[in-house]
Image (cartoon, helix red, strand yellow):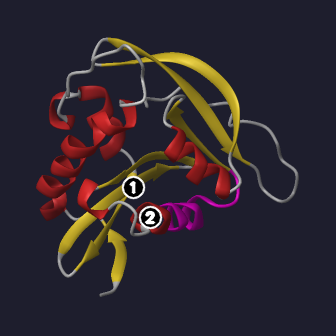
């Protein structure tokens, strides 16, 4: 059964919101001694706006969305996989598609404690270049900026990029 990455369509909204709802707190599950309450994407004005000002792609298999990703310029802004589809290469396939779109130099933000995601990003040449405090639904979270540089040796972080959401 072939998995295919394709551009987001407005008819995908409910599936994207469901994947976010089922996956968002998973990226924070490694935060010790902190408790997080889900803020649905459609009620998180900042993250919702950032997602929909981005280019969004979805990965589907037999008409079912298994994950989605988003980018703006050289920043990867979202990469979420449905929990039932984890371990099947969904995240990897979406990440490869996003990297093909943004080019060799790419930037992303990730919760510092989310080691599974950071391992995936490192396999694709990302390194941690900054650590900063952010928040999710009112709870502080340490995050990392991860950067992948072009082969030309450009090792500057996009100077216009601000610390993004996790």
Q: Residue at x 29, y 34 (%)?
A: 25
As helix, strand or loop, the secondary structure at mark 1 comes to: strand
Q: Which mark is residue 137?
A: none
Q: Is residue 104 left or right of residue 102?
A: right
Q: Which residue is mark 2?
A: 94
Front-most of residues 64 and 85: 85
**Foreground of the two, 118 or 18:** 118
Of callouts 1 and 2, the N-terminal one: 1
Q: Quick check: 108 left or right of 7?
A: right
Is the N terminus in the top left, top right, bottom left or bottom right quadrant?
A: bottom left
> In the drawing, does residue 119 fall left or right of residue 64?
right
Q: Give me the C-alpha separation between circle 1 and circle 2.
A: 6 Å
State whether residue 125 is above or below residue 136. below
Helix, strand or loop under label 2? helix
How many numbered callouts? 2
Left of 130 or right of it: where is 116?
Answer: left
- The one of 94 and 159 positioned closer to us in this rendering: 94
Q: Is residue 162 visible?
A: no
> Which residues are the magenta region?
94-105
The residue labelled by disc 1 is: 69
| Label 1 close to label 2 by CB (< 8 Å) | yes
Quadrant of the rendered image containing residue 39: top left
Q: Residue furthest bottom?
A: 1
In what quadrant of the picture does the C terminus appear?
Answer: top left
Residue 100 sits inside the magenta stretch = yes
Q: Is residue 61 magenta?
A: no
Q: Residues within 10 Å of mark 1 (few under 14, many from 20)?
A: many
Please state the horizontal and vertical placement of residue 59, each as a whole percent of the image: 33, 69
Q: Quadrant of residue 28?
A: top left
Residue at left offset 29%, top offset 63%: 85
| Residue at image coords 38%, 37% | 27
């Amino acid at each position: 059964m072939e998995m295919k990455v394709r551009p987001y369509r407005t008819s995908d909204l409910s599936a994207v919101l469901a994947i976010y709802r089922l996956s968002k707190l998973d990226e924070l599950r490694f935060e010790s001694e902190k408790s997080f309450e889900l803020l649905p994407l459609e009620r998180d004005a900042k993250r919702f706006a950032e997602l929909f000002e981005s280019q969004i792609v979805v990965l589907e298999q037999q008409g079912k969305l298994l994950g989605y990703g988003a980018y703006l310029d050289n920043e990867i802004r979202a990469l979420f996989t449905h929990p039932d589809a984890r371990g099947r290469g969904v995240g990897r396939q979406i990440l490869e598609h996003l990297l093909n779109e943004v080019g060799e130099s790419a930037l992303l933000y990730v919760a510092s404690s989310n080691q599974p995601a950071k391992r995936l990003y490192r396999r694709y040449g990302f390194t941690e270049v900054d650590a900063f405090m952010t928040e999710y639904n009112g709870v502080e979270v340490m995050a990392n900026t991860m950067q992948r540089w072009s082969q030309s040796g450009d090792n500057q972080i996009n100077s216009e990029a601000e610390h993004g959401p996790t």
